[in-house]
């Protein structure tokens, strides 16, 4: 690996220069901006490296499939590298120090929308393959790429794509790099994600806002209708979700997963200070990560009704609406949870409408699969640090399409710095993290035993 590392270290500036055109191209899937232009640009990069690629259409944004085969052929393991080329909208634009689609180097970081999420991390994977090809003229194991353009829109077409292309995507395991390292700066190896169900509850009262003196009392207020409904969904003392059947089928953590959880540190004082909270409001590290990885949630994302401007306005509002998400854990099915939510709402109120806004299934790969140990060892060798092993993340990614449809292990190694500002102004990727990311996959490609 010394020659590979040497090549990476001496070509960092070239890698950054090659990344900049990709970051300069807006690719906002939620607005349909620049999707095909970016896909074409990325395919040219892959072909130049030596990765055979093709653009495959879906009902939405196209998927890029890439492949490079090891001379060892069928005797070599096959890794399926997942990533996405779309990004979040850049607004608010006036909060950016430099323009979001004008990559800028400052203080050892590259600033641009998509630098960390996910163009920069995806580009690191490609540079790892390039390093092997440039130094040795080959890759020691088979590599496939599946790169989608709708991750920031909840990947609505990925499940069908994977179902229809099982043979094309056949691999031994999936490797993803997205998100940041641990808050301490240590690298992490992640084996799962929570799922998500996003809904909107709404109700109406009168056909217009009414004077609260002339009408308040005899005319029902839709805000109270929503508040009364929300109170039936969660026990205020324990936080337990009261929707009937909500906890059915949940897969409890294994002893090995609990042991991994206990090894993850939490700097409560730092987190409390960063969030502006009293430290006593935070649970212990064990309970913190227990809730984050293995327990589902019922969360209010936003509430809108009535007048919220300056001063007072005495009205009975005509409408009320709340947006909610539910983070789901292994074996919970968002379709099943949505049906249970609908049943609960109708039992409590006939006047509240429920709209389904999006979902993603949870996924969790067993820690004892045969790829965890070599990946952990590769990250340690590449970064010089022992990675923390996370049985799951609290967030959601379309991981289920790999573990549930392809039926293979899926493991994530995030490369970005903790303050990458993904989804926010001044998104960035520390160049040293970018380099370590290249080294991680380059090391892994050389680490796995041949069959």
Image (cartoon, helix red, strand yellow):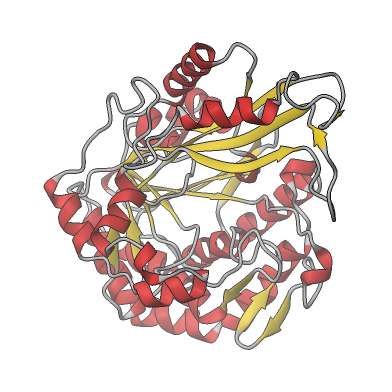
Q: Is residue 437 above or below residue 61?
A: below
Q: Give the x, y percent position of residue 106.
A: 68, 85
Q: Give the x, y percent position of residue 289.
A: 31, 56
Q: Give the x, y percent position of residue 26.
A: 78, 56
Q: Is residue 352 left or right of residue 134?
A: right
Say whether residue 392 is visible. no
Say whether residue 395 is visible. yes
Q: Is residue 389 left or right of residue 303?
A: left
Q: Is residue 161 left or right of residue 392?
A: right
Residue at 37% x, 28% y: name it: 242
Q: Is residue 224 above or below residue 119?
A: above
Name the quadrant of the N terminus: bottom left
**Residue placed most toward the observer, 62 or 87:** 87
Residue at 40% x, 24% y: name it: 243
**Residue placed most toward the observer, 316 or 294:** 316
Q: How many marks?
A: 0
Q: Give the x, y percent position of residue 14.
A: 64, 79
Residue at 69% x, 71% y: name it: 426
Residue at 26% x, 46% y: name it: 75
Q: Is residue 332 above or below residue 397?
A: above
Residue 332's quadrant in the figure?
Answer: top left
Residue 239's quadrant in the figure?
Answer: top left
**Residue placed most toward the observer, 413 or 135:** 413
Q: Is residue 354 left or right of residue 363?
A: right
């Amino acid at each position: 690996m010394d020659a590979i590392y040497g090549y990476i270290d001496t070509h960092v500036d070239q890698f950054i220069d090659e990344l900049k055109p990709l970051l300069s191209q807006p690719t906002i899937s939620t607005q349909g901006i620049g999707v095909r232009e970016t896909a074409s640009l990325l395919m040219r990069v892959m072909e130049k490296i030596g990765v055979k690629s093709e653009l495959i259409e879906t009902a939405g944004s196209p998927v890029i499939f890439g492949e490079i085969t090891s001379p060892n052929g069928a005797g070599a393991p096959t890794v399926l590298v997942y990533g996405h080329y779309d990004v979040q909208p850049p607004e608010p634009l006036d909060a950016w120090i430099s323009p979001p689609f004008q990559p800028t180097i400052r203080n050892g970081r590259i600033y641009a929308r998509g630098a960390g999420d996910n163009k920069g991390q995806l580009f690191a994977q490609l540079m790892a393959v390039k390093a092997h090809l440039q130094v040795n003229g080959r890759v020691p194991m088979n590599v496939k790429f599946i790169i989608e353009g709708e991750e920031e829109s909840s990947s609505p077409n990925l499940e069908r794509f994977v179902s229809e292309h099982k043979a094309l995507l056949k691999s031994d395991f999936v490797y993803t790099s997205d998100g940041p390292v641990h808050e301490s700066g240590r690298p992490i190896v992640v084996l799962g994600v929570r799922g998500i169900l996003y809904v909107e509850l709404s109700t109406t009262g009168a056909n217009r806002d009414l004077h609260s003196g002339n009408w308040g009392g005899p005319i029902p207020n839709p805000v109270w209708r929503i508040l009364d409904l929300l109170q039936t969904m969660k026990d205020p003392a324990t936080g337990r979700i009261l929707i009937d059947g909500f906890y059915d089928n949940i897969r409890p953590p294994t002893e090995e997963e609990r042991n991994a959880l206990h090894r993850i540190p939490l700097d409560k004082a730092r987190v409390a200070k960063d969030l502006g909270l009293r430290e006593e409001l935070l649970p212990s590290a064990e309970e913190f990560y227990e809730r984050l990885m293995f327990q589902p949630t019922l969360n209010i994302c936003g509430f809108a009704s009535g007048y919220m401007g300056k001063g007072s306005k005495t009205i009975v509002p005509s409408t009320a609406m709340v947006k909610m998400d539910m983070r789901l854990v292994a074996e919970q099915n968002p379709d099943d949870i949505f049906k249970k939510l609908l049943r609960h709402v109708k039992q409590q109120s006939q006047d509240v409408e429920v709209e389904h806004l999006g979902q993603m299934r949870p996924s969790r790969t067993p820690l004892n699969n045969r790829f965890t140990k070599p990946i952990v060892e590769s990250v340690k060798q590449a970064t010089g640090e022992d990675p923390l092993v996370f049985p799951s993340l609290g967030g959601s990614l379309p991981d289920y399409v790999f573990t549930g449809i392809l039926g293979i292990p899926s493991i994530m190694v995030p490369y970005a710095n903790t303050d990458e500002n993904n989804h926010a102004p001044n998104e960035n990727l520390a160049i040293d993290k970018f380099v370590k990311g290249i080294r991680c996959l380059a090391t892994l490609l050389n680490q796995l035993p041949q069959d």
